[in-house]
Image (cartoon, rainbow, N blue to C red):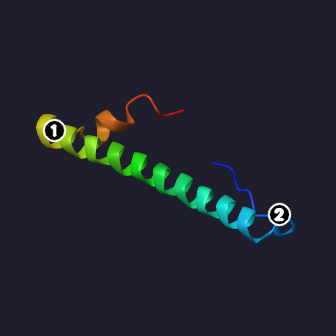
Amino acid sequence: MNDIVPDSSLGGEAANILEHQMDYDKTQASHCLLSELAKGEESLRLHGGLSIDEAFFGLEG
């Protein structure tokens, strides 16, 4: 995600447009994340989850 700070030299209207675009982008990213979390919850409910041992299998150094 880009952390672009609106430049005050752009002028009021352009700075507002840029700020609104950045808010929109953050909202879209949040929506995508929540959608993926919902898919994971649905999968867990339908198919069950992993045990702790299964989840960490193969991660030991």
Q: Which residue is farthest front?
A: 13
Q: Earlier in the sequence, mark 2 or mark 1?
A: 2
Alpha-carbon neighbours of circle 2 within 10 Å: few (<14), some, or many (≥20)?
few
Mark 2: amino acid:
Leu
Residue 8 coordinates in the image, percent (x, y): 82, 70
Instruction: Report the side of 44 relative to 16 (left or right).
Output: left
Q: Nearer the viewer, residue 48 or 13?
A: 13
Give the residue at the far left of this rendering. 46
Q: Is residue 2 above or below residue 11?
A: above
Which residue sits at x=20%, y=37%? 43
Q: Position of residue 14 (x, y in %)?
A: 74, 62
- Residue 18, compared with residue 39, is above or below; it is below
Q: Quadrant of residue 55?
A: top left
Q: Which residue is depicted at the point 33% across and 46% down?
A: 35
* Left or right of residue 41, residue 6 in this image: right
- Of the 4 image quadrants, the one containing the C terminus is top right
Furthest residue toward right: 9
Find numbered disc 1 in the image and state the secondary structure of the residue it sits on.
Answer: loop
Question: Disc 1 residue type?
Answer: Gly
Residue under label 1: 48
- Relative side of 1 to 11, left or right: left
Element assignment for label 2: helix
Q: Residues within 10 Å of mark 1 (few under 14, many from 20)?
A: few
Q: Nearer the viewer, residue 47 or 53?
A: 47
Disc 2 target residue? 10
Which of the 4 image quadrants contains residue 49?
Answer: top left
What residue is rendered at 47% in x and 33% in y? 59
Image position, residue 51 (x, y; %): 24, 40
Residue at 87% from the left image edge and 67% from the top image edge: 9
Q: Is residue 9 above or below residue 31?
A: below
* Mark-to-mark CA distance, 2 and 1: 53 Å
Q: Nearer the viewer, mark 2 or mark 1?
A: 2
